[in-house]
Amino acid sequence: MPRAWVDEVREGLKGVALAPEKSHRVGRRQVALVTRYRYGVESKKLQTKDLIATGIFTAIYFVTMAVCGQLGALIPILQVLGPLYIPIICGIPFILFLTRVRVFGQIAIMGIVTGLLLILTGQHWAGLVLAVVLAPLGDWIAARGGYKSWWGIVAGYAVFSELLIGMVVPLFFTRQTVLERIGTRHDQAWVQQVADLTPPWMFLVMILMIVVGSAIGAYVGRVLLKKHFERAGIA
Amino acid sequence: MAAVNLNSVSFSYAVTPGAFALDDVNLSVDPGEVVVLCGSSGCGKTTITRVVNGLVPHFYSGSLAGEISVCGLDPVKDALEKTAAVVGSVFQNPKAQFFTTDVLSELVFACENLGMPEELIVSRLEGVILALGLEGLRERGIFALSGGEKQALACGSVYMPDPQVVVLDEPSSNLDVKATKDLGELIRSWKAQGKSVVIAEHNLEYLVDIADRFCYLRGGRIECEFTPAQLCGLSFEELQDLGLRTPTPWSLLLPEALPTGDDGVSFSNVTCVYPQVGKILNVDHIAFAKGAITGLVGENGSGKTTLARFLAGLEPKAKGLVTFGGRKLSARARRSQVYLVTQNVSHQLFTESVEEEVLLSMKKEDRDRARAILASLDLAELAKSHPMALSGGEKQRVAIAAALASERPIVVLDEPTSGLDLRHMHQVADALRSLSRTGVTVIVITHDQELVATCCTAIHRIQDGQVVSGE
Amino acid sequence: MRLANALAYGGRPHLQIDPRTKLVILLCVNAICLGAGFSGGDIWVRGAISIIPLLLLVIERRFVLALICGGATTLALVMEMFWLGQMDGFVELTLAGCANLAARFVPGMLTGIYLLSTTTLGEFMAALAKVRLPRAVALPTAVVLRFIPTLALEAAAIQESMRMRGVFWGGGKPGAFFTYRVVPLMICAVNMGDELTAAALTRALGNPGQRISLTRIRLRLPDWILIACCLGILGIWLVL
């Protein structure tokens, strides 16, 4: 038996209660279940099945996000509201994922992989940088509440969703470019007017929209969880 | 020395703590022995396979008692990866078994994970491809394979690391007759190589010549064991009592053809061409009688599903003429006149309770009628349950209830009984009969000989997109 | 088979490039197109880097895509160069802003499409492993890329069933348009995910210790040329 195997299994067993279980009744028969192994449920390390679960829910989250984003591309008005409605709809897979989150790190990895995927589909790398910072933070916030406290979840999700700002960063550069360009040809008053149209505090508005959207999204996710997913047996 | 040894094993899943999935099971399998676990749904056969390959308790948590030893390892105490080195597992659903996206990567996936030396992997690869007939599929992507090819690939990827024990969980559920025979031959070759094979199955026919014994389970206990001879010797009534599918379906009586009048569904000159695959369908004429249950049989990939989807108006690449009751039906008309129950029923269930699901099909919501329909299909107690929480057989009946409620004159079902045990198959057959009694034209695509014998009044055979004989 | 061509019958790409090169191209295109401004030579830099994905797509015979997107990008860049300065009304301004956005996003998307349609999952994971991405991130990424085509197929099947049952537009109930699509997809996806996990675990995924990989990737001459071009353009932009 190679050493690595044994050590890994021992590692995973830290914190597992191996005490004999009291016998309990089943119908009329009494059966003593001698040892209760709860591998993989108690260990605090990230295991393969956690990573696969993270991957699956990240796929669902990303596809949901992409489809919502495409809606915005078709109907340009929606793009402005994107930071509001995207966290709402993406709240559904996120809340569902929370029922499978076992240890710290899964939500962080979800954020980082989402950032990677955003780059793969041609978005700005700011998305990844934000994800690397915000996703672990959001994970930590949610973990403080044991992934069960409602406000911990909402706060964690809100912080996590802020990585969507990464998609908006190029707009900032667009604004710079446009301002620069007209600056060379027109007078300052005109430039000032245009600059006023798209004030820098738009950014803050978007951040706030994401927070509001996340709160609503978490709520929507919980409603669907109770109404459908728990009763369907997957939560 | 037995390769697999279960000693007084009891297990209850964490999600159902009061119910014993396994109750004091003793099982021992020698090298070169093929043991088939049979019984009705929920009897524990799948749980035993999970105990052997270590998924219980590492993935499906719960309370476990008893001693298990597999090739000298303890799947409970040892890590799942260690057990995976000696136990190969083949699952029921071909679509959800593959981790990679192309054939060669999938074949070497397990070996790569186990750290087998590269030369060994490459040397085994050719042999396995030959043994499973995967030669023509080398460069293909997994999504392009048929069900039978997928299952062959799964067996190949399990075979590559040369495990000593192989467990299979209902592997022939989605396979046609030919693919099932190939699977049987593969199991025979594994047996000859000295592997221990444990198979949980409903479909016993292809295993009668190969298995060493059949263990019948009920309620988590092994009630009795049969040799193949004893199993074939069981009378029809005894099989019905046990809830087992017949191991000798060739002895079933298949239906005669009914003369079809003008009031049924009739297809003419149906063709369907896919760009890279070629001509899938080339049907000159095929007719289905009204108020009758007609079976549509044929191998996987012969075009039955395409024909069904064409009938439902969902196949834009297919062209042809469809008449119903003498009147021509356009694609749009067909979409509102044909109810198609797909193979994966979960795609069709949208609402939060069975009753809502039935109401959804109605043009005008009528709760009384919905309740009557549910009662007629024996679903009354499940009226408030979530459709997705039901078992396979129950979901099929919910889909049929929704078809009844929609009052559409044509209902097509694609493989309604794959993976169902005897009792549920009979329930589906009864549901189909009540459908046809209301005058609906029922078309059933199936491999299940017992279903055909139980409720079909006529069958059509399709091969390579053409009607072979309307017998 | 290629990542994004799960549903088609993809063959080998005409030009074999190491996935790491593709990543480098992607990052460069990303950085320049989304970050570069307008002054002086910047617009030429943006133009130059946008040509690379177009060229690659043309080599892969995806002419239609290259033509449409290439045309769009050129139009946008030209509009910016000559028209933007002449702006007066707000409408033209917004148009110019849109053009700018198009010129920024399209090359990145093109490179993304090129990458996803010419790399197999195995090659991509080998590249990530060479770049020393930790297993905790690489494994979920592999799962995501493998699972997305499956999700697409499931979603298509659900949409078709909705059409068949006549509830494609929701059937009158509030929110039904979304819930009828989203809920079955989630449930099917999670169930499939569980089956996938069980299968992968029994194939010893997550085995500690050295993992062999049969997929070989190597940097060859075309790779070095492309990397040199990209880094060169990036360098020019940074310097100027």
Image: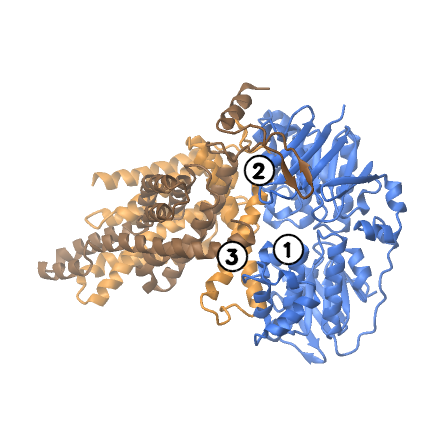
Disc 1 and disc 3 on one polypeptide chain: no
Q: Colour of chain C?
A: orange
Question: What element does badge 2 sit on?
Answer: loop
Q: Which residue is mark 2?
A: B59
Q: CA distance from mark 3 to mark 2?
A: 24 Å
Instruction: Check if mark 1's residue and mark 3's residue have beta carbons within 8 Å.
Output: no
Q: Which mark is residue A228?
A: 3
Mark before the other along the chain sequence, 1 or 2? 2
Neighbours of disc 1 within 10 Å: few (<14), some (14-19), many (20+): few
Q: Which chain is brown?
A: A
Q: Tell me the kind of residue under disc 2.
A: Phe
- Would residue A139 appear left or right of B400 to someone viewing this image? left
Separation of marks 1 and 2 at Cα, in angstroms: 40 Å
Mark 2 — on which chain does it sit? Answer: B
Q: Residue at x 60, y 45 (%)?
A: B16
Give me the chain that's blue.
B
Q: Is residue B44 visible?
A: yes
Q: Secondary structure at mark 1?
A: loop
Q: Chain of mark 1?
A: B
Residue C3 x %, y %: 50, 46
